Amino acid sequence: MADVDVLGIVGAGFMGSGIAESAALAGKHVVVHEPEQAPLDRSRAGLERSVAKAVARGRLDEAGAAGVLDRVVYTTDIGGLRAADAVVEAIMEDPKVKGKLFQELDRLLPDARFLASNTSSIPIAEIAAWTQRPERVLGLHFFSPVPVMSLVEVVDAVDTGQEALDDACDFAASIGKHTIRTKDRSGFIVNMLLVPYLMSAIRMYEDGFATAEDIDEGMKRGCGHPMGPLTLCDFIGLDVMYAIGESLFEEFKRADFAPPPLLKRLVVSGHFGRKSGRGFYDYSGSRAAA
Ligand code: 3HC
């Protein structure tokens, strides 16, 4: 069993950047790939901010911070991933786009320990089927914000090999994450439980049963959740919530997974939550906006 010293990441969004930060903090070298330069620049700026905050709070010294920044490199050239011992993909939730990417990664990295997808709900088997070596393909599902959340779901698909699973679990442990294993069903363990709860909160609000603030305060103060459900939807991204709900509904045909009409209306209107400035709340004033 070989260690993963160099991690490749495809996708420089919130999740990919968070995975890069966690891995670099644990001493790994990281190559982050995106075809466009702008998301890479945003990812780098985010890492610099996060590292500066860690120094200000006394969690990292100046040398440690410089080390983290040095260990993460960014490239628009997918060939840059050849240096990686393993890859985690964190791109848009589209099975065909992911499938084509894995086909390319499979060709590019014949010796990689594993090729993992951070998908929340797309079947790993469907992604693995695009490759010649499906035994190396598995799910590594991180939680947002990745540097703070200690969980990773390790998803074992029909053709995933034991060696790849063991290597992936060892890798996750080496960057300080706790792993739980799950079979390859849409939603895995956490979203299977979380999504019906979040969709119920949206339906409750849509029905006019209570205000967004009261629904959120109810779960924060009544159950000790760090964020209420509508704030959490805005944090995850309403487009992401919609895609996960659709995938779960398609897999199980159960109404509690189906995205409510209001969620669809917000998404088609470009209100994706915190990242677009408006979702259930308006982030210029933090009032209920939907
Ligand atoms: N990157 C790095 N560190 C971060 C961070 C980020 N993006 N966001 C917050 N932090 C750190 C802060 O620096 C701070 O650290 P410190 O105390 O050492 O300085 C600590 O986290 C707490 O942050 P804040 O004081 O700014 O704010 P809060 O105390 O309100 O915590 C939160 C923020 C951690 C996001 C908390 O509200 C929370 O846990 N929310 C719930 C998140 C959750 O449920 N995530 C799972 C989503 S589901 C998912 O991801 C699956 C997907 O498939 C949908």
Image (spheres, helix red, strand yellow):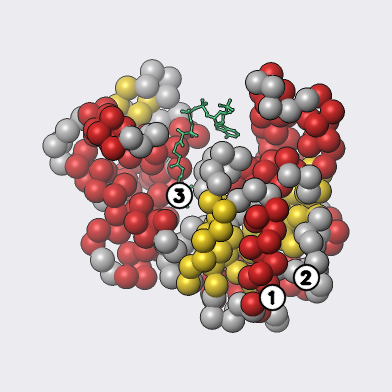
Amino acid type at image mark 3: Val
Residue denoted by label 1 = 163
Answer with left or right where residue 260 lies relative to residue 269: left
Disc 3 versus disc 1: nearer the observer: 1
State the residue position of label 2.
Answer: 1
Which residue type carries mark 1?
Glu
Q: Which mark is residue 32?
A: none
Element type at mark 3:
helix
Q: Residues within 10 Å of mark 1 (few under 14, many from 20)?
A: some
Calculate the distance from the C-alpha at mark 3 to the C-alpha at mark 1: 31 Å
**Residue 38 appearing in the image:** no
Q: Quick one: label 1 or label 2, which is nearer the N terminus?
A: 2
**Distance between the alpha carbons at the discs numbered 3 and 2:** 35 Å
What quarter of the picture does the N terminus occupy? bottom right
**In screen coordinates, is 252 left or right of 48?**
left
Per the image, label 2 sits on a secondary structure element best described as: loop
Side of 85 relative to 99 (left or right): right
